Amino acid sequence: QVQLVESGGGLVQPGGSLRLSCAASGSFFCINAMGWYRQAPGKERELVATITRGGRTNYADSVKGRLTISRDNAKNTVYLQMNSLKPEETAVYYCNALIVLYAQGVNDYWGQGTQVTVSS
């Protein structure tokens, strides 16, 4: 059973920082792309950032220069360092990973989500 478990969410003041982590566990061959998405109340889920296995990154325009995605392939973990956070970035943040299983090819997995609240 493959699982993605997120951690690191919480309450932070505007302009503050948080670091999210997402670790994949279970039996699989390897992990291809990983990413972070977010969903604010009443809005659709949106892309925040993605990273390939080789480290190539892609960001939503709204987060460039403030949020940084990284990964540790040895730990099957992806991170999101969030700096200069804004109240409008309050949302549930979800981890996503394309995981290659031994006998079933590539599968798309999501974490359970972690709440990030930016408020004074």
Image: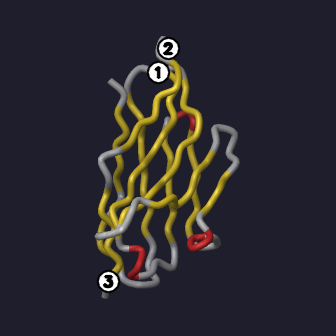
Left-right relation of 56 to 95: right
Label 1 secondary element = loop
x%, y% of residue 89? 42, 74
- Residue that appears at 30% across and 70% down: 42
Q: Quadrant of the C terminus?
A: bottom left
In front of the other: 23 or 56? 56
**Residue 66 found in image quarter:** bottom right
x and y percentages locating residue 62 in the rendered image? 57, 73
In the drawing, what numbered circle is on residue 28?
1
Q: Position of residue 59 (x, y in %)?
A: 61, 61
Front position in the image: 107 or 82: 107
- Compared with 16, 8 (above or below) is above
Q: Are marks 2 and 3 in contact (CB under 8 Å)?
A: no
First in sequence: mark 1 or mark 3? 1
Mark before the other along the chain sequence, 2 or 3:
2
Determine whether label 1 and label 3 are within 8 Å by CB: no
Task: Kindly state the secondary structure of the residue where label 2 is placed.
Answer: loop
Q: Which residue is under mark 3? A: 119
Q: Residue at x 31, y 73 (%)?
A: 117
Q: Residue at x 35, y 49 (%)?
A: 6
| Residue type, mark 2 in image | Tyr
For residue 95, the mark is none
Query: Which mark is drawn over residue 102?
Result: 2
Q: Name the residue located 52 percent from the left edge and 26 percent from the top edge.
A: 106
Quadrant of the drawing holding the N terminus: top left
Residue type at mark 1 is: Phe
